């Protein structure tokens, strides 16, 4: 059928998930990461058609950072323009913990119906 | 994809700017900065790709300009709404008196007042910095060191304007850039200087820095005068009572004398308190209004429009 509905569905799903994935990536990393690096990690982790555009990563990083869940600093790079490096804060870790809980619960709930629940 | 896909980094950024047309200039500056950082990093990672190939790849992975624009508009609206302090219900009440006094519940009014007082200090700093930098750059222009001095001076001026923007956003709520202006691809010193000289924002930023001194003087004077008048009137009943009870005796200057005499009478005390409160409340209203106007003016001078 038409792609439009699928794309819209994906976009709506992504609205919250991008932030969750970004928090998880930064939490798993011992180093601070810059936007391009994060975008590339997402791209590598994903096989086939990209789930979201890399351009949507930056505004979410900025929003998380404005809310104090990430800390950022600008550092010059030897190859090209200066980069903004991000690191997760204590508040960000707490948020990630809560969100992971919500996510597992939601995933299990949806899966139960998709698998066709007995009774 | 889009039929008119951009074929160069500059073209992409222009298309992004166009897609964001009408949005907050500060948001546009941030979005363009992020895109430029990503695109230049992509270019540095794939040095053997032609610019057109690179752009095709970028549109596929990073997103077409209109998709990226939509992402920024979307996220920013949500964040701005979330960060805005709730508007007090009393502030919207129809009662004129409640509306007048509701300013005491607005944290922005106090920060605005603080900004007015602080502006004398920052104004002095900015003015001195701008004048010294300009004089130094002009004076050294005949020598070769004048050029890097000029660029360094403009660089610091832009950093100051970013900081001033953050301060004004915190004080007034007017959206200001969260990113500096992207330095762009590395070009020669001469070209960079020409670019800086041609950029209208260079001059409006300097104008803002110079303007802050006279404005700071006016702001400071208004704030301190009104504070002093308001607080003094509020203190008259206490001082008068303390003097009558003999709690306050000064051997050096003799007793306090109030002119006109009637302000230190029971009837006058009522007037003093009412008048003091009115002056202080009006000051908070004025502070809030002045800072709001100031922030809007600052935005037209410090942020590239459109």
Image: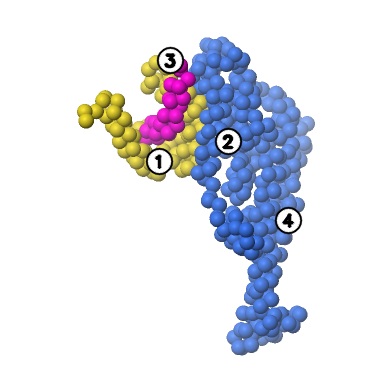
Chain colours: A yellow, B blue
Residue under label 1:
A92
x and y percentages locating residue B197 in the rendered image: 74, 30
- Tell me the CA gap for discs 2 and 1: 22 Å
Q: Position of residue B301 (x, y in %)?
A: 71, 40
Q: Quadrant of the C terminus of chain B?
A: top right
Chain under numbered label 4: B
* Circle 4 Cα neighbour tier, 10 Å, few/some/many (<14 / 14–19 / ≥20): some
Where are the magenta residues, as a range? Answer: A1-27
C-beta proximity under 8 Å, tags 1 and 4: no
Q: Could you tell whether A50 is left or right of B138 in the image?
A: left
Examine the rendering and report whether any part of residue B110 can be seen.
no
How many angstroms separate mark 2 from mark 3 (CA)? Answer: 43 Å
Q: Residue furthest front?
A: A119
Mark 2 or mark 4, which has the lower sequence index? 2
Q: CA distance from mark 2 to mark 4?
A: 30 Å
Q: Is residue A21 left or right of residue B44?
A: left
Point 63% across, 61% down: residue: B95
Residue corresponding to mark 2: B179
**Going 73% across and 56% down the picture, which residue do you hit?**
B217
At label 3, counting other C-alpha atoms closer than 10 Å, the crowd grade (few under 14, some 14-19, many 20 or more) is few
């Amino acid at each position: 059928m038409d792609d439009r509905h699928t794309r819209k569905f994906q976009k709506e799903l992504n609205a919250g998930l991008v932030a969750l994935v970004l928090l998880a990536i930064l939490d798993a990393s011992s180093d601070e990461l810059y936007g391009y690096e994060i975008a590339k990690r997402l791209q590598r982790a994903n096989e086939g058609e990209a789930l979201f555009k890399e351009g949507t990563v930056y505004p979410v990083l900025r929003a998380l950072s404005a809310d104090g869940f990430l800390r950022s600093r600008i550092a010059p790079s030897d190859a090209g323009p200066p980069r903004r490096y991000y690191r997760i804060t204590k508040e960000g870790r707490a948020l990630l913990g809560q969100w992971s809980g919500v996510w597992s619960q939601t995933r299990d709930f949806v899966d139960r119906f998709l698998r066709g629940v007995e009774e | 994809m889009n039929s008119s896909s951009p074929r160069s980094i500059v073209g992409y950024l222009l298309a992004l700017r166009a897609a964001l047309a009408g949005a907050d200039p500060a948001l546009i500056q941030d979005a363009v900065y992020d895109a430029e950082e990503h695109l230049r990093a992509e270019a540095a990672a794939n040095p053997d790709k032609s610019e057109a190939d690179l752009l095709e790849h970028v549109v596929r992975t990073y997103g077409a300009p209109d998709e990226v624009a939509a992402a920024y508009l979307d996220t920013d609206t949500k964040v701005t709404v979330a960060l805005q302090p709730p508007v007090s219900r009393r502030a919207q009440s129809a009662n004129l008196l409640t509306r007048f006094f509701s300013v005491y519940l607005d944290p922005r009014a106090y920060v605005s007042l603080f900004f007015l007082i602080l502006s004398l200090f920052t104004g002095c700093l900015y003015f001195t910095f701008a004048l010294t930098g300009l004089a130094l750059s002009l004076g050294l222009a005949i020598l070769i060191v004048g050029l890097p001095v000029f660029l360094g001076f403009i660089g610091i001026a832009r950093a100051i304007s970013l900081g001033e923007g953050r301060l004004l956003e915190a004080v007034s709520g007017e959206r200001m850039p969260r990113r500096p202006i992207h330095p762009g691809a590395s070009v020669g010193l001469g070209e960079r200087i020409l670019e800086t000289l041609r950029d209208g924002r260079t001059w409006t930023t300097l104008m803002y820095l110079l303007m802050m001194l006279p404005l700071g003087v006016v702001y400071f004077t208004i704030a301190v005068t009104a504070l002093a008048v308001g607080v003094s009137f509020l203190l008259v009943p206490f001082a008068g009572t303390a003097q009558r009870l003999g709690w306050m005796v000064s051997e050096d200057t003799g007793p306090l004398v109030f002119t006109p005499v009637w302000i230190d009478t029971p009837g006058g005390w009522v007037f003093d308190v009412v008048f003091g409160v009115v002056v202080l409340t009006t000051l908070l209203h004025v502070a809030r209004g002045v800072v709001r106007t100031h922030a809007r003016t600052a935005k037209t001078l410090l942020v590239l429009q459109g």
